[in-house]
Image (cartoon, rainbow, N blue to C red):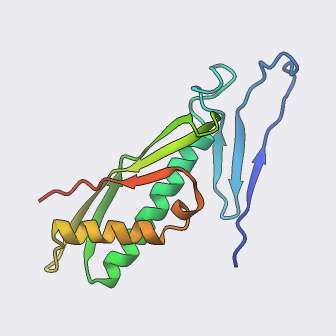
């Protein structure tokens, strides 16, 4: 078993608080040294209380799902002797209402586009199979309740 940590810090500074117009900008710090500006989503809390330049939790969830899927895809492709040169994903998530009427991420769609080189080139069916296997292995996808779809963009 592994434990992962993140340090989340926020400070009110001198702004009022009880009027609910305080800044939601904060920092995420990770054990490897990454320091990320974060904020609530401007879709949830309007600017200027949100900082659109910060990563919001909803974006982070989408990026986490995309990143986990990509890492599994790369590992599985390497095991099959495929050389992946590029991997890009235009992932998106939908914040909606769940069955109980509460706001929740209701779906995340991954749209990975890959480029290969070398003599061993995968067919579109091979790529679809790799994405299916990557989705099955991704423990982040297995950890969320929303529908996580993968719609690979396959180029000739």
Does residue 2 appear to the left or right of 143 in the view shown? right
Q: Percent position (x, y) of residue 94?
A: 48, 38
Query: Is 83 located above or below residue 54 in the figure?
Result: below
> Quadrant location of residue 102?
top right
Residue 76: name its quadrant. bottom left
Measured along the vertical axis of the image, is residue 61 above or below residue 4?
above
143 and 10: which is toward the camera: 143
Residue 26 to residue 42: above or below: below
* Residue at image coords 66%, 19%: 48
Q: Is residue 55 visible?
A: no
Residue 53 placed where, x, y %?
57, 33
Pick the residue in front: 144 or 57.
Answer: 144
Is 99 located above or below residue 46 in the figure?
A: below
x, y percentage for residue 107? 47, 45
Residue drawn at x 55%, y 62% as measured from the top left: 140
Point out the image quarter for the N terminus.
bottom right
Screen quadrant of the C terminus: bottom left
Q: Which image quadrant for residue 2?
A: bottom right
């Amino acid at each position: 078993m592994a434990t992962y940590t993140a340090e989340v810090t926020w400070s009110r500074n001198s702004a009022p608080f009880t009027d609910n117009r305080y800044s939601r900008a904060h920092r995420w710090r990770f054990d490897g040294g990454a320091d990320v500006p974060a904020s609530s989503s401007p879709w949830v809390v309007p600017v200027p209380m949100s900082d659109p330049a910060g990563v919001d939790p909803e974006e982070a969830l989408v990026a986490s799902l995309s990143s986990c899927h990509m890492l599994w895809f790369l590992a599985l492709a390497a095991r099959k002797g495929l050389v992946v040169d590029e991997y890009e994903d235009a992932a998106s998530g939908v914040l909606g209402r769940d069955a109980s009427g509460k706001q929740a991420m209701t779906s995340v769609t991954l749209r990975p586009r890959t480029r290969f080189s070398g003599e061993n080139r995968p067919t579109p069916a091979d790529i679809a199979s790799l994405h299916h296997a990557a989705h099955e292995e991704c423990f982040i996808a297995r950890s969320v309740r929303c529908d996580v779809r993968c719609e690979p963009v396959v180029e000739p």
